[in-house]
Image: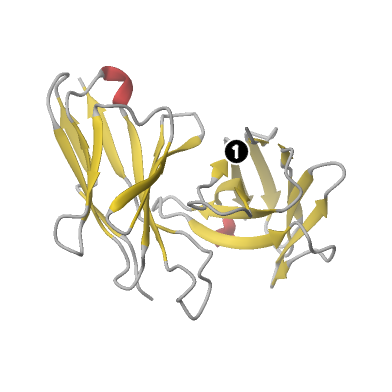
Amino acid sequence: AQTVTQSQPEMSVQEAETVTLSCTYDTSESDYYLFWYKQPPSRQMILVIRQEAYKQQNATENRFSVNFQKAAKSFSLKISDSQLGDAAMYFCAYRSAGAGSYQLTFGKGTKLSVIP
Amino acid sequence: EPEVTQTPSHQVTQMGQEVILRCVPISNHLYFYWYRQILGQKVEFLVSFYNNEISEKSEIFDDQFSVERPDGSNFTLKIRSTKLEDSAMYFCASRGGRGAVVRHYEQYFGPGTRLTVT
C-alpha cells in the first residue's frame, strides 16, 4: 500500500518570502500522480498543483512549484512571494495511475502560517 | 465556478443513532467519493462510486456505512449506528471523468461535514 508522509506539522513564513513544504511517499508503482492540495480555514480543499511521475520536468503554477525527486520519492512544494492568503493546511496526496477509482492517499498535512 | 456542496456543516448525534450526510456533486461529474478526517489525523479514503455502484472501498467502510445517489443529484453517506470513533470531518468529492473537457483527473472537494458523536 502507498503511504504519504509530511514531516512538518507546522511551518511559518514571512510575507513575500519563500517557503518549502516537504513530502515523501512510498510506493512500488512506477507510474502515479502526486498532488498538493490547499485547505484554507473555510475547509474546502483546492488543488494547487499536480505532477505526473513519468514527467521529469517539475510542475509549476504561478508562485507554486514542486521539486519532484522520483528516485528519492520526494515531492516538495515551494511557495514563492508568500501572501497572507496562502495561510492554510497543505496536503500532499498520491494517486495510482492504473485503472481504478482514482482514490487519493493523503499525508497528515502541514499548517502554514504567513506572518505579515 | 461550480462547487461541491455538503449539508449539514455540523451534525451532532448520539451513539447508536443513524446519520445521513448529504453532498451535491458538480452536475456533470461521474465519479463520487467520500473521505474522512479524524481530528489531527490524515484524510482517509472511504469509498468511491461510479455508474450507480461502489467501485472501491477501504477497510474503514464496513457494513455500518452505505452510499446512495437517490435522485441523480445528491450523493449520500449513511452511517447506520454511529460510534464515538466515527466523530470526524467527512468530505465529499466528485470528478468529471474522461469525457470532461478540462482536468478530468481532478477531484473537487466539498467543505465537509463535521460529525460529532456523543
Side (left or right) of A19 relative to A92? right
Q: Is residue A83 visible?
A: no
Q: Position of residue B8 (x, y in %)?
A: 19, 47
Q: Quadrant of residue B59?
A: top left
Q: Position of residue A64 (x, y in %)?
A: 70, 64
Q: Nearer the viewer, residue A76 or B75?
A: B75
Side (left or right) of B25 relative to B39? left
Q: Quadrant of residue B31?
A: bottom left
Q: Quadrant of residue B100?
A: bottom left
Q: Secondary structure at mark 1?
A: loop
Q: Position of residue A85 (x, y in %)?
A: 54, 61
Circle 1 crowding by C-alpha within 10 Å: few under 14, some 14–19, many from 20:
many
Q: Nearer the viewer, residue A89 or A31?
A: A31
Residue in view at x 70 percent, y 68 percent = A63
**Amino acid type, callout 1:** Gly
Residue in view at x 60 percent, y 38 percent = A107
Q: Position of residue A8 (x, y in %)?
A: 68, 35
Side (left or right) of A1 relative to A72? left
Residue annotated with mark 1: A107
Residue in view at x 45 percent, y 68 percent = B97
Q: Is residue A21 visible?
A: yes
Q: Reply above or below: A25 against B97.
A: above
Quarter of the image with the C terminus of chain A in it: bottom right
Q: Reply above or below: A55 against A43.
A: below
Q: Residue extending furthest right?
A: A71
Residue in view at x 81 percent, y 55 percent = A67
